[in-house]
Amino acid sequence: MEQLVDFWNRLTSIEIVDIIIAFGIIVFFRILSSTFSYMIIRIFKIKSKKAKEIKESAFFKPLKVFFIILGIYLAVVFLKIPLQINEHTMNIVTKVFKIISVIEFAVGLANSFTVKTILVKKLRASLNKKMDDTVFEFVLKIARILIYVIAIFLILTILEIDLTGLIAGLGLGGVIITLAAQDTAKNLFGGAVIFIDKPFVVGDWIAMDNYEGTIEDITFRTTRIRTFENALVNIPNAIIADASVTNWSKMEKRRYKTNLCLELDTPLEKLELLKVRIEKMLRERESVYDDSIIVRFDKITDNGINILIYTYTNSVDYTSYLKEVEDINVKIMKILNEEHIDLAYDTKTVFVR
């Protein structure tokens, strides 16, 4: 209570002008925080003349917060003598100001390392196809983590915490954590293997064990797959690194294969004509590889004569592939109808005495 009374006595002795000036400093920096941020970013972005582009910069909002905090800090410094603030309190205020400044700078710098920023877009364009999109995003994540780690160490330095003892403690703690989190370490290593070997990237259609779907995201610990049932599955990277993964998106061509079982009494002349017409139909299709076409009378079964039709198509997307198969099957059925050739049924002849 005595401290409050003492503070009030000191406060009442302050000239009203000092209070107005301090309040004016805060208001001044609050109102002009956007302008100051805009001017600073404009200086470093000489080529950029669009106000919207500058305001969408990664540093714009952090700079606004910095200038607002700067106004409050300068107001406190201005009132140091009138309020008779001791050095210990001022040191705390100064440390808080420095910590907030480091945090805002780290946030702005980290936000600069995202795929949406102009700087990163230009960097990605300069790399062209030298680096995969997934690997590029992984590198950006590593950069953001390093920025925050450095910021944490700077904050610890501002707080005057002994980093030598902390690092030594982290070394011992690291051993304990590693022993307690071996599965996590395996997943992190598996994630590194995925990024290095690149068996798939975001957007690929893969199949493995009991999972099949499209890759939505690859993180340090897990890989997210959107299944064809529209479920999102998080699979640990350690499991993927040890599994056999089929990447259907890497197919350059897709196989078409079918068997036509004709009746045993089909004339050989019609059989040869059927082969010729089917092969001609396939060669006329732009989506079919001519050197892969096989139309052969390959075997005689109990039910009839078997014609093997085998080829490859460049329609690798599943939807377009089904459409291609449908078109080929329809044309084959038309040829059969035009030549009056019937398909054999699974029949048996029974003799009764």
Image (cartoon, rainbow, N blue to C red):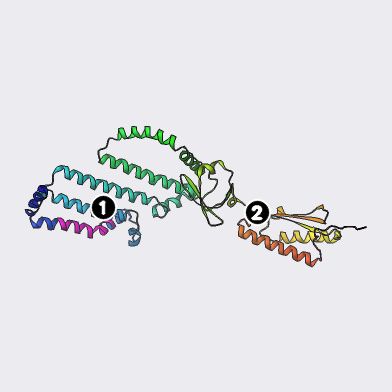
Please give left or right for residue 289 compared with residue 197 in the image: right
**Which numbered circle lies on residue 66?**
1
**Circle 1 residues within 10 Å: few <14, some 14–19, many ≥20:** many
Distance from Cα at disc 1 to Cα at disc 2: 58 Å
> Is the residue 122 above or below the residue 155 in the image?
below
| Depth order, front residue of 296/186 | 186
Q: Which residue is mark 2?
A: 254
Residue 131 appears in view: no
For badge 1, the amino acid type reads: Phe
Judge by depth and name the residue closer to the eye, 322 or 48: 322
Whole-percent x, y for residue 98 in the image: 24, 46
| Residue 235 seen in the current view | yes
Instruction: Confirm or deny contact between disc 1 and disc 2 (CB under 8 A).
Output: no
| Between 14 and 12, the one nearer to me in the picture | 12
Q: Is residue 27 left or right of residue 5?
A: right
Magenta span of residues: 22-37
Residue 53, how many percent across, how many down?
35, 60
Quick one: label 2, few (<14), some, or many (20+) residues within 10 Å? some
Check if residue 32 falls in the magenta segment: yes
In the rendered image, residue 223, in percent from the top left (x then y), is placed at 50, 48
Is residue 204 located in the magenta-colored stretch of the structure? no
